[in-house]
Image: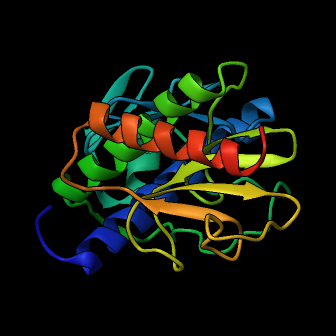
Amino acid sequence: MSGNRGTYAGTRRQLRGVAESLIAGPQHRASGTVRLAVRPDGFTGTALPLAVHGTEFTWQDGHAPLAGTVEALAAAAGLDYGPPVGVYELADPLPAAAELDIDPDAAALIHRSLYAGGFALKQVLPQGHPVLWPEHFDVAVTEDEVNYGVSAGDEFHELPYAYVSPWTQRTGDFWNAPFGALRSIVPAHDVDELADDVAEFFREARVALGR
């Protein structure tokens, strides 16, 4: 990945803002859902044909680079820019006047990690339906009061990581985070290696949970 962690964090924040205010917000206003889905090279709405592919934004009749202001991008796509209202507490919405500056390598790591997470979830929890949630920018499944997922990163852990978060706190060596357990994503791994890494972590978690 080119640049440094600041570059990655900036790209992650911008892509989360795009997910929240260019896809989930318009989709919620039109269809009542904020659920997104991961794709090999990005993510997409589940009820509207709005998506990110690499460093490009696409809609039903067009596409444009993720560049310039998000407000101008929304206007080009004919969208009402803004996050969903009344669904969750907004923490860090991307301002309409924000100028996008997406690092391609950082974006590729985010897309690869989230897609690998979705694939691992389907392997380990085949009855689940992985959802990319715009609030925390993580792909996750909940089973028996335990959340399993992969996050693109946050203030707690800057780079992508897999996590398992039981609703009831657990104790023991495996549980290495305030919310449960996490394992860092290896940035150099390809999508298949990442999926294997994450699936193994989820299986270890299920043993620790007694499942």
Question: Split into 4 quadrants, where in the image is the N terminus?
Answer: bottom left
Give the camera-side residue of 63 and 198: 198
Give the camera-side residue of 52 and 176: 176
The residue depicted at 78 percent of the width and 44 percent of the height is 210
Q: Residue 91: x percent and y percent?
A: 67, 74
Question: Split into 4 quadrants, where in the image is the C terminus?
Answer: top right
Q: In the shown orientation, is residue 202 left or right of residue 39?
A: right
Query: Is 204 above or below relative to 10?
Result: above
Residue 176: image quadrant is bottom right
Give the camera-side residue of 180 and 86: 180
Q: Residue 38: x percent and y percent?
A: 48, 33
Q: In the shown orientation, is residue 20 left or right of residue 75?
A: right
Give the camera-side residue of 114 and 99: 114
The residue depicted at 38 percent of the width and 35 percent of the height is 196
Residue 81 can be seen, yes or no: no
The residue depicted at 46 percent of the width and 43 percent of the height is 198
